[in-house]
Image (spheres, rainbow, N blue to C red):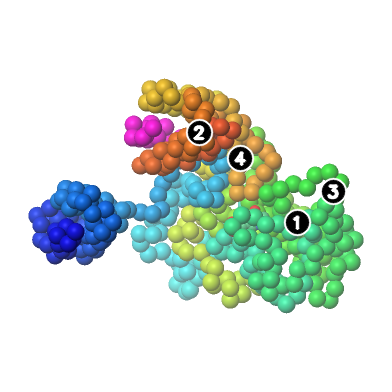
Amino acid sequence: MKSLHASVPSIDAVLRRDMVVPLISQYGRSLVKEAVRSVIDDIRTAVSNLAKEAIPLLADDHIFVALESYLSRAISHSLRKVFNLTGTVLHTNLGRAMLADEAIESMVEVASGFSNLEYNLDTAKRGDRDVHIEDLLCKLTGAEAATVVNNNAAAVLLVLNALGLRKEVLVSRGELIEIGGAFRIPDIMTRAGCKLVEVGTTNRTHKSDFENAITSKTACLMKVHTSNYVVQGFTQDVSAEQMVKIAHSQDLPVIEDLGSGSLIDLSKFNLPKEPMVSESIASGVDIVMFSGDKLLGGPQSGLIVGNKKLISKIKKNPMKRAMRLDKITIAALSSTLRLYLDPDKIKSRIPTLRLLSRDLKDIKITAGKIKNELTTILNNDIIIDQMDCLSQIGSGSLPVNRLPSAAIVLRPKNTKKSGRILKYYADAFRALPIPVIGRINDGAFVLDMRCLEDVETFVTQLGELEL
Ligand SMILES: *Cc1c(COP(=O)(O)O)cnc(C)c1O
């Protein structure tokens, strides 16, 4: 045993070998040294545990392969491109909206040089970074003023803190939402320093519930878009117009968390209609908050539009400084908003809307191509079918409305242990150079073709599938 331990080379000895010279020139000496230390440590452990069986690990060949694998992992990016074939277009875990080409170009331009981010080119004085977005947002929503922060959760937190600190905020019990990732209205309320006053019941809230709950401590009435569930049956809610009427009669503002919100009428694209920001503003809501990377199809951001005086108060809140957008996001957001100025371009230029409104015929053609490819590549133990399926918009938008789509489904011929085999299929697709994410459903591995546009890249890497 002792002699085997003695034959494990020292770190210095490995570093002196010819085989590490190319590694050092590629990865640098310090990283290679770290790799050698880790590989030698592993070999020592293996020798202790496996004794003689560990002898092959001492060969130069093995050491070299282990070093290469450590080094390539060390420099590889953790954040990678994937194929989203889950059927959920706005998938929060897979990065939500893809950006339009125009938005990407603006980001590159602003990132690679200086810009007038906070500099007024007319007066040569200090400017405000919101100006690059405010006019556009006002034009697109009909609001008087606008500001932006990092995401909609931040927008809600900021607005509540700016308008309701140490005061009461009235919300219907039917709208006390939780969305994924720990965003819950009652918790946000507490953190913003506001007191939540629940009014009405889960299924029914009346005008009088709001009227009776207003006190001298009331800061505002809040409406929340119940984006990820619906209340059906014996229900009653108070509309934005009604809330505005009640609030304004007492000189109080109404604020609304619209979640996704839309700048256009989605029914024009044959999609289920999502509440529009302009409709909230038109109904008299004083402040509307919504996400930049949901249906809008832009970068992660939280948009706040509405009454000029209130927006000015919100902008002066110290938390705004901690939540402000960086120049790259501002560039992407402003380019995305600009695309909305030309309604004819929206559907083709904004990838999220392009995918959501994609023609079923086109999705089926893609599915047919992929089915053919997979049939030639995969072995006969796997059944490959094309099937109709339903995609989801995602990110809490329109949870009950699904979009007809087409999928490729894989199933083992032998149904014994099929659960394990399906997981094995999913693992194999995830292990591709550009990982493919599908879902396991009803005894099959399902790949929804709605979000597959780059068929060529997808097909090229299928040869590497280990199935
Ligand atoms: C998505 C959503 C949020 C949070 O928005 P983020 O941009 O993810 O921070 C808040 N409220 C509602 C109603 C939502 O749907």
- Ligand 1 - quadrant of the structure image: bottom right
Q: Residue at x 49, y 26 (%)?
A: 414
Say what amino acid the circle numbered 4 marks: Gln
- Amino acid carrying mark 2 in the image: Lys
Question: Which sits in the foreground, 448 or 279?
Answer: 448
Q: Which mark identifies residue 417?
A: 2
Q: Earlier in the sequence, mark 2 or mark 3?
A: 3
Q: Which residues are magenta?
A: 452-467
Q: Is residue 311 magenta?
A: no
Quarter assignment of residue 266: top right
Label 3 secondary element: loop
Which residue has dot 4 on it?
A: 392
Q: Give 323 or 464, whichever is nearer the viewer.
A: 464
Whether residue 459 is in magenta: the answer is yes
Q: Amino acid at mark 3?
A: Thr
Tell me the SS state at disc 1. helix
Name the residue: 56% across, 26% down.
Answer: 387
Q: Nearer the viewer, mark 2 or mark 4?
A: 2
- Residue marked by disc 3: 235
- CA distance for labels 4 and 1: 22 Å
Which comes sooner in the sequence, label 4 or label 3? Answer: 3
- Tell me the element at label 2: loop
Whole-angstrom CA distance, mark 4 to mark 3, is 25 Å
Mark 1 sits on what residue? 175
